[in-house]
Amino acid sequence: MGRIFAVTILVIAIGSAIPILRHTWWMPQDISTHGAPIDEQMSETMAEAGICFLASQILLAAFIWKFSNPKPDSKIKTFPGGASGLVIAAFLLVGTEVLALGAFGAKAWAKIYFTPAAANALPVQAQAGQFAFYFRYPGPDGKFGPIHPDMVSEANQNFYGIDINNDQDAKDDIVTAEMAIPVNREVNLLMHSKDVGHSFFVPELRVQQDFVPGLDVAIHFTATKIGRYEIVCTQLCGLGHYNMKAYLSVMSQQDYDDWLKKEAALQ
Amino acid sequence: MATTVHDPPKSGTDQKHPALTTTGNGNRGGVLPGGGNLREVKRYSPPPASTGIWVGIAAIAMTFAAFTSALIVRKGSSNDWQPFTLPIILYLNSALLLASSVTLEVGRRRVAAFMAGVKTHRARPARWLYVTLTLGVFFVAGQYAAWKQLRAQGVFLATNPSSSFFYLLTAVHALHVLGGLAGLLLVIGRLRSCVLRRSTLDIASRYWHFMDVLWFYLLLLLWMTL
Amino acid sequence: MHDMSAQAVQHHAPPTSFIGKHVFSLDHKVIGKQYYALALVAVVIGMVLSWLMRIHLAWPSAKIPLLHYLSANGAAGNVMTPEYYLQLMTMHGTIMVFFVLTTAPFAAFGNYFLPIQVGAEDMPFPHFNMMSFWVTFVSFLVMIASFFVGDGPTLGGWTQYAPLSAIGPASGPGQGMGVVLWASSIAIFCVGQLLGSLNFITTTLDMRTRGMSLWRLPLTAWAWFITSVMGLTAFAVLMPACILLILDHVAGTSFFVASNLVISDQVQPHSGGSTLLWQHLFWFFGHPEVYIAIVPGMGIVSHVLITNMRRPLLSHRVMVYSMGALAVLSYMVYGHHMFVSGMNPFSSLAFSFPTLIITIPSTIVVLIWLGSLYGSKLRINSASLFSLGFISMFISGGVSGFFLAQPSIDIMLHATYFVVGHFHLVMAVAAIFGIFAGTYFWFPKMTGRMMNETLGKIHFWLSFVGAYCIFMPFHYLGLAGNVRRYQAFVDDYLQPLLPVHKFITVAALVTGAAQLVFLYNLVYSRFRGERAADNPWQATSLEWSTPTTPPPFDNFGGQHPVVYHDPYQFGIEASTGDYVMQNSPEEIHTVRDEE
């Protein structure tokens, strides 16, 4: 039975690896400017993790095959190099591997989080609330009107609680249910939550960031490919969590301007 | 039985048998038994109650460490923290608690001497334990008085995060002090029935002193942040 | 100077009444069995919950027979509502993590065997020990009660992130009473764990019999000791967190709820609280908790495999140091659950380094096992199969940790099925396999009967293959971006993944059914199993040297064993065969010294 088990482990290990090698299920195509290091990091890690996975499962299988159900008079043998060899191997090989991954990954992370948004980045506000995303554009004055929580009303479709009568800056704000951005233009997304924790995830854009109630969080990114992508909520927010999504449309600058005008008219 | 039964080793060979050698002093009271030599085989173990009370103290310390970090984070996360003056009675309570530690330590030594059969002309050693108990009860009553005073000023648990932490920390501490009082009652009861073990006396004292130390830490924390 | 027999142990007389023997027992062995029974009930409930979840995920509008009896609101017409899915999911996670994975490997087997393995009569504080079980039991009742109140259990996941968990009923069904019951149950659970840890630590440090130095402790004893230290510090932080959560609910405080939150057009009455505070407190507990779930399993696997390989590990000390290193590092990594949480991105990097480094002791542990298999005389039986299965599962689950440890990659994998696959492989499979290995190995000692080997092997094969069929695909789903905690998959990009979910559901139901083989084997063998010898595995540690099987009330029949040898003297020539028991005075010629 030991040998059958060894073969089973081998089959499972190799079988599990096949969909990975063939990218049967994989990340969607990257449409961001910061995503390449992330994808590279993913591939690097997949290669190293894959080697560790296969090597250790194969060793496990091999040793079970060889040493199970032994003859009664066989002698116990010690692994060459003993424990010290293995410990040194672990420290050196795994140690360097993880430090390398850590260092390169840190660079990828720093590129996203430690570089400030460009001065001319397009500011867009995103508000997450049970169970929808709403977006706000500042309009021609470039300023967002203040948010009045007591004026937030789903019933009146005043999702942001803005006071167009008394706040000058709010008069030209554009609130939409869909997010549109121009291609190849950096966007500064200003995120806040209306109620509980939510998250903004667009796999193609290589962006995932939680909305934190009480905190204003800003992330910036640039989309490089025109298309329509789904924004999904990834932080459990209640019964409608599974259904909480919006669309991100990446458009040409012209199309975006047209869209914005249309949305402004609908306010 | 699967094992072969052998004659037990003769007592004369005990000392030479590698299993039973003892080296060093056994590191009385140290953290690691055997003086840190994990190969050593001790012939003496500290009473488990002694280790046990340290374990309990560690757990309580961790709990208050968590409350402390919650306080610090909560204070820094928003600008709604409103400090208030600590009721003066708190300082009186602190003095009472400190005094109770002193009386407890005196009492503990005298009771220990009494239990060890040291002849003494001194008064009944349990007296000091009773004094400690009384001071402890006054401490808890004083804490309650502090709460009443704050409530009279309109400062309640939910009034402000600062008051939330004040009530929370003092109440949780007071609860643990009540536990300490129960321990002292147990010690006094066993002493009177002449079934008190030395370890019980020691650990009840250690716990009580820890309550004292913990209180002064909390007082400092509240004084600095409130 | 006085030795063990004069210790201030509470020598308690054997109980005579039924209640004293089986209900309110001070005997650590009974307490261990009580914990095992609790874990068994909990795992059945947790597993049934997982079936309900999986059926709903594959067929969201399916009518599940009898479900409306569990909740008229949550399953009107036997069709599960979206909120009820989340409520069942929350209970599944909570019950499994707390009442199965923290209870069985540590409290059940540890309570039973730690005192025996160190050569003691019982734990030093039997009353606290008994209390620890009953407190845990009360905690379980409070948790189960939430199924039957108002609008049901909380739906916020076992992680109960604020402010969803702290705002109150406005944020969803089950978020009023459900949360209060959850938090109360967990706070009570923490007390039980602290009482348990107290006993484990003092037993290991103070109750060892003559000759039992720390390095002569079996690896299970080390694992339980390390786990109990982790438990002490971790649960001591979870309890304050739950108290603060309860206060936010019932006392109008705002520890976790920020200002100006609006639900249903109402501004919520809280202000100034910190959302991230809950996460920091929870994960400071949460990460050591998962090592609490796995380290006893590592001890059990080592212990079982050594006996079945007929040789000690390549290095006993390295295994101990590695388990210790895992425990220490586990406190430094908790922020890897919060990489994209909105905390300072620099903190994310800071947490990722210890997280990457913790792969080193994990690797060493696996390599030591593999290196010990080399040249061994491996016996294949149910216990050793589950131990080897543990190693395979731990490799698989551990390797996905490489990804999740890096914040840049976590951007793509956080809150996806990749994470769910990772933790199920290490916890739901590896840790459970550790429990199975322990059960098959120690059943003879606990009951005096052997479990049926054929049934054990059937159980193993179905579970091993089944578990891979269930959880390996989770990683693929995660890579494709499949978000977790969704009760149905309505997004466009998720549609192509639905067939994978159906496959997983079928695998889950089959693997679940296979567990009935184990349950049957347990019950059948308890009453009709073949009688076991005192030491059926020819093992060396003290539990196999008790004068009777099951052990007598005071474990060693009034004698205190004397220990002469290191714990795993195998592969030597002795009068008993290729091994010598720890308490055997026989001197052996090729002493296998741990380096």
Image (cartoon, coloured by chain):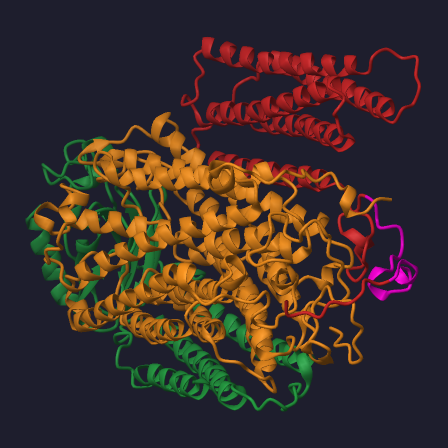
Chain colours: A green, B red, C orange
Chief secondary structure of the magenta portion: loop
Identify the residue shown where x is 41% and y is 70%: C452
Which image quadrant: the N terminus of chain B? bottom right
Identify the residue shown where x is 33% and y is 84%: A15
Q: How many marks?
A: 0
Q: Position of residue C109 (x, y in %)?
A: 52, 56
Q: Position of residue B205 (x, y in %)?
A: 73, 27
Against C359, is B122 above or below?
above
Q: Is B52 positioned to the left or the right of A97 in the image?
A: right
Q: Is B69 positioned to the left or the right of B209 in the image?
A: left
For residue C352, say whether it is visible: no
Q: Is B176 positioned to the left or the right of A187 in the image?
A: right
Against C462, is C47 above or below?
above
Against C413, is C201 above or below?
above
Q: Position of residue C69 (x, y in %)?
A: 15, 44
Against C22, is A89 above or below?
below
Identify the residue shown where x is 38% and y is 42%: C140
Q: Nearer the viewer, residue A115 or C121?
A: C121
Which image quadrant: the C terminus of chain B? top right
Q: Nearer the viewer, residue C367 or B4?
A: B4
Q: Quadrant of residue C269 in the image?
A: top left
- The range drawn in magenta is B10-28
For residue B173, say whether it is visible: yes
Is B23 inside the magenta-drawn segment? yes
